[in-house]
Image (spheres, grey):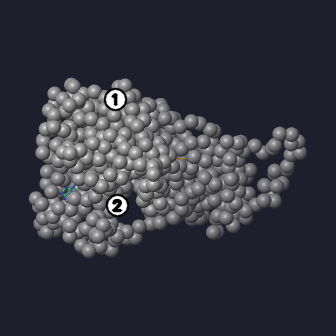
Amino acid sequence: MAAEPVIIDKETHTFRQYEDGDHITTNFEKQIFVEDTSYKCPVYIQRTPPCQGSCPSGHEIRGWLQIVRGIEKPGDDLERDAYAFYRNTVANPYPSIMGRVCPAPCQDGCNRNEVDDYVGINSVEQYIGDSALEAGLKFENLPDLGEKKVAIIGGGPGGMGAAYHLRRRGYGSTVFDMQPDLGGMMRYGIPSYRVPRDKLNGENQRIVDMGGIEVKLNTKIGVDISVEQLEKDYDAIIWAIGCQKGRGLPAANADAPNVITAVEYLDAFNKGKLQTLGGKVVCVGGGDTSIDVVTVSRRLGMVEDLAADQRPEKVTSGELQAQDEALGAQRKNVGVTLTAVFPRDEMMATEQEVLEALHEGVEIQNEVMPVEVIKNDAGMAIGLKMAKCTVDDRGIPSPIEGTGFEIEADLIVSAIGQITDLEGIDGYANERGLMDADPLFRHPDHEGHFVVGDIIRPHLLTTAIGQASKAAEGIDQYLQGVEISKRPKVDVHQFSLAAKLEETNLTPSGYEGGDAFATDTTDIAVHNFRDRSKYEIINANELFLGHFKRSEVSKRERTGPDEAHVLGDAHPLMKGLEEEQAVEEADRCMSCGMCFECDNCVIFCPQDAVSRVKKDISTTGRYVATDYTRCIGCHICSDVCPTGYIDMAMGQ
Ligand SMILES: Cc1cc2nc3c(=O)[nH]c(=O)nc-3n(C[C@H](O)[C@H](O)[C@H](O)COP(=O)(O)OP(=O)(O)OC[C@H]3O[C@@H](n4cnc5c(N)ncnc54)[C@H](O)[C@@H]3O)c2cc1C
Ligand code: SF4
Ligand code: SF4
């Protein structure tokens, strides 16, 4: 029978056995040890923690946190941080970038939220990434390259993720990108104060250094090279082209030249073509991209009476190659307004980003929508007619009658979403201008074509990379001429007991991975082990939360400028954790669904049926052994196991 869920009040739970004033004690020995037996013995069950289940890259988070905190140890040839890096990058080769700008859905899913606050997974990831770059770590022990080769269209996170995951499987590739450098939106969308370029360059280069990955930049597929040519030259094709255009402003008169999109604005800024602005900026948005627009604008500032031929829209339209560099010296603060249809607490941007924008002097107006662009006689936008609005269930705003007002603007930036650039390749798109992909990331109409990332549906960096990993697995099977396997229910990178035993030279004879059951004739199992990680995510209710002392999450120092110092600022926004802080943060992980060697079961077993495995044969997941001839099924070990690793399930 399923256990009743335990409702935990985070503010008051203390897990005390008695209320104040209680004086009659219960005979626990009688109640639990003798009368309350499960008639079943323990089975040790690996499950997926919810952090991993919530990470679109399917990171094996629990594993690399246990390494950083020192519980799971490397072999003799690796340092702790290098071991954590190699485990971390099984899923995603960009820890330094993810650690900075991934909005960390893993942390929303973390079970530790039920005790005090999430584990700062994202900050430990940044620590792993930065320390690996500092140490100059490379991807090593790669399989030999086979003869088959894949064409990857797009060198953003999806395309580079695919090149990386294919190389790990022994396939070479050519990455084609129409931009002058690799990185996609990591370089031409997100500004350098959020994604420092030395980190991006380092992580890109490390992938290229794997060998067998050719890069062809300034090459637009569909224009410079046809898809038919790629089909002739390569054994498979991956589409990772993202959405390279911004959605225009849905308001009357939005055709003025100084009404531009966020994508073109940020592209020009990130290429160093913009030095300054000519006056007040209004950005319509509310998500990550709009925050980048307004914070970039505050950094760019304005020059009074900016010459018409130096205006920013001349650059974004391509009429002017770049603004005059000398303008940078003349700029002063510019007024920047962000408008959003949602209330402040429902904006798509994270709370942290919103607070930072406010700190930098951005004005935010919520629950308002643009109605019409106000133009002057020359056809230039000089403001926006706005109205207060309501938003329906589909997210579509409607103006509230009689609430109209105007905002002055010298530049209006639409940051309400992206669309695709399908020049020469529109035959591969669906009716929404995106590309279809089946659950195995195959293009449904073109054999040998696979699709990943924003071109399926704009989302996150980590999503594009997670899809690239799955597509690479499918391509591997496709190129071997076998049927591509269905994806598992819980589709993330998992800890593999078999791989761990192999790594530590401890594989018992006859063990090929998966479940392992103790018998009197084999040494395969030290206890009965089941791997349920592909089917089950472990809930906080299944943990013994009383084991964990409350502690505060270590927040990274945000070094962003205030409104008085934002002009021209280019410093990275976030300072990473120091080593000691990273270890401390990793130490807050409750290791949901996997033994973390706390000894509770050994200490509390009244039958001495559970013992520590001898050091020279002990490893992750095999730290304790159970003598089933002594076990009476009292379930104390299961009750006191903080990680939910033990079920009274033998025979089930
Ligand atoms: C301004 C902005 C800020 C963002 N901030 C965040 C954030 O903080 N955190 C987060 O997780 N996500 C963020 N995102 C979303 C994230 O950047 C995307 O989800 C991610 O980059 C998608 O990866 P991708 O590889 O599919 O596409 P992209 O990153 O767009 O890469 C596609 C690449 O394909 C190339 N390409 C396109 N067409 C062709 C062609 N025909 N031939 C050759 N090359 C081609 C492009 O030049 C580009 O380099 C942001 C997006 C934007 C626009
Ligand atoms: S990539 Fe994002 S969701 Fe995944 S572990 Fe890192 S921060 Fe969490
Ligand atoms: S406590 Fe650790 S294993 Fe559990 S969900 Fe949080 S980060 Fe993951």
Residue occupying image coordinates x 49% and y 41%? 120
Name the quadrant of the C terminus: bottom right
Q: Which mark is residue 145?
A: none
Dot 2, how many residues are within 10 Å of its Cα: few (below 14), some (14-19), or many (20+)? some
Estimate the spatial distance between the alpha carbons at disc 2 and disc 1, rounded to whole Å.
34 Å
Seen from the viewer's position, the closer of residues 388 and 312 is 388
Q: Is residue 499 toward the left or the right of residue 50 in the image?
A: left
**Label 2 SS:** loop
Q: Confirm if mark 2 falls within 8 A of ligand 1.
A: no
Q: Which residue is mark 1?
A: 566
Is residue 133 visible in the rendered structure shown here?
Answer: no
- In percent of width and height, residue 369 lies at 40, 51
Q: Is residue 631 left or right of residue 425?
A: right
Q: Secondary structure at mark 1?
A: loop
Residue 585 lies, in percent from the top left, at 51, 37
Q: Residue at x 32, y 40 (%)?
A: 408
The residue positioned 34% from the left and 29% from the top of the image is 566
- Cβ of mark 1 under 8 Å from ligand 1: the answer is no
Foreground residue, 169 or 628? 169
- Contact flag, marks 2 and 1 (Cβ < 8 Å): no
Amino acid, disc 2: Arg
- Which quarter of the figure is the N terminus placed in? bottom right
Q: Is residue 155 above or below residue 530?
A: above
* Left or right: 3, with 138 as reference point: right
* Quadrant position of residue 248: bottom left
Label 2 sits on residue? 457
Residue at 73% of width from left, 64% of height from top? 39
From the viewer's perspective, is residue 138 above or below residue 159?
above
Asked if residue 276 shows in the view, the reply is yes
